[in-house]
Amino acid sequence: MERWILVAETNCTVPEREDEFNDWYNTIHIPDVLETPGILNATRYECADPQEGHGKYLTLYDVETDDLEQTLSAFGEIMTGKWEEGRMSELVDAVHAAFYRQMAPTFER
């Protein structure tokens, strides 16, 4: 089973509504994404000094799959369904998202 991370950088489109954005992201969006088989968990971060062209918020999703294409397909179907159900937010600006394959063991001190 290959290990991957899904990296997602986002911004809130209306800075005055960041609390609402973060509540939606944490309580609706992440649980929706975690419905995808192979996406195991998520951790969110906030940048101390966001730069132009990058997301203020970073979410890392741990992924384990033998077939990334199948995982991507399931992810796309689930997210399309959530969009159709009205579960996406107009407050989200997805700056960047990509899957990265783990290429070396985890290093520990």
Image (cartoon, helix red, strand yellow):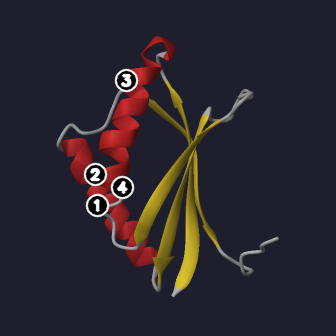
Along the line of sight, the residue nearer the viewer: 23 or 83: 23
Q: Earlier in the sequence, mark 2 or mark 3?
A: 3
Q: Earlier in the sequence, mark 4 or mark 3?
A: 3
Q: Amino acid at mark 1?
A: Glu
The residue identified by callout 4 is: 33
Q: Earlier in the sequence, mark 2 or mark 4?
A: 4
Q: Nearer the viewer, mark 2 or mark 4?
A: 4
Q: Amino acid at mark 2?
A: Thr
99 left or right of 36 in image: right
The residue identified by callout 1 is: 77
Q: Amino acid at mark 3?
A: Glu
Residue drawn 52% across and 52% down? 43
x then y, percent, for residue 44: 53, 45
x then y, percent, for residue 69: 45, 75
In which quadrant will I find the C terminus?
bottom right
**Contact check, label 1 and label 2, Cβ < 8 Å:** yes
Q: Nearer the viewer, mark 2 or mark 3?
A: 3
Q: Cα distance, mark 3 to mark 1?
A: 26 Å
The residue identified by callout 3 is: 20
Against 85, is 92 above or below? above
Q: Amino acid at mark 4?
A: Val
Q: Residues within 10 Å of mark 1 (few under 14, many from 20)?
A: few
The residue identified by callout 2 is: 80
Q: Residues within 10 Å of mark 2 (few under 14, many from 20)?
A: some
